Image (cartoon, rainbow, N blue to C red):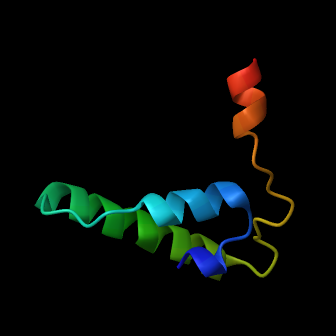
Amino acid sequence: MAAYTSFSGGEDLALSLQPTTDLFEAELWQKQTSEAVALFDSADNVTIGGARDVRQAVDNS
C-alpha cells in the first residue's frame, strides 16, 4: 500500500499500520475507508494533488 501513496507522510503512515484485534477500531477504520472512497467517487475533481508533508515545519514551530 505504501507504494501507492503520494507523499512521504502518507507512506510513513501506511508503513506504520498494524492489524487490530479490537472490533470497534476495525469498524472505525472500515467506516473511514468507506467515507474516503465515497468522497473520491463523488466528483472527478477531488484530488490530494499538491499535498505536502508538513511534519518537520510543525515540529519546528
From the viewer's perspective, is 7 left or right of 11? right
Instruction: Examine the rendered structure and indicate whether residue 9 appears above or below residue 2.
Output: above
Depth check, front residue: 60 or 50: 60
Q: Is residue 19 left or right of residue 24?
A: right
Residue beneath the point at 53% across and 68% down: 36
Q: Nearer the viewer, residue 14 or 31?
A: 14
Counting the numbered discs, the total is: 0
Q: Position of residue 43 (x, y in %)?
A: 72, 78
- Please indicate whether residue 33 sits to the left or right of residue 40 in the image: left
Task: Determine whether 52 is above or below 14 in the image.
Answer: above
- Quadrant of the rendered image containing residue 20: bottom left
Q: Quadrant of the C terminus?
A: top right
Q: Residue at the spot x=77%, y=70% of the render?
A: 47
Left of 18 or right of it: where is 10? Answer: right
The residue drawn where x is 69% and y is 38% is 55
Across and down, in percent, residue 46 comes to 75, 71
- In the picture as drawn, the residue positioned furthest to the right comes out as 50
Residue 17's x, y, as percent? 39, 62
Q: Quadrant of residue 7 in the image?
A: bottom right
- Residue farthest top in this picture: 61
Position of residue 10 measured from the top left corner of the image (x, y, whole percent): 62, 61
Instruction: Identify which residue is drawn at 12% across, 63% down.
Output: 21
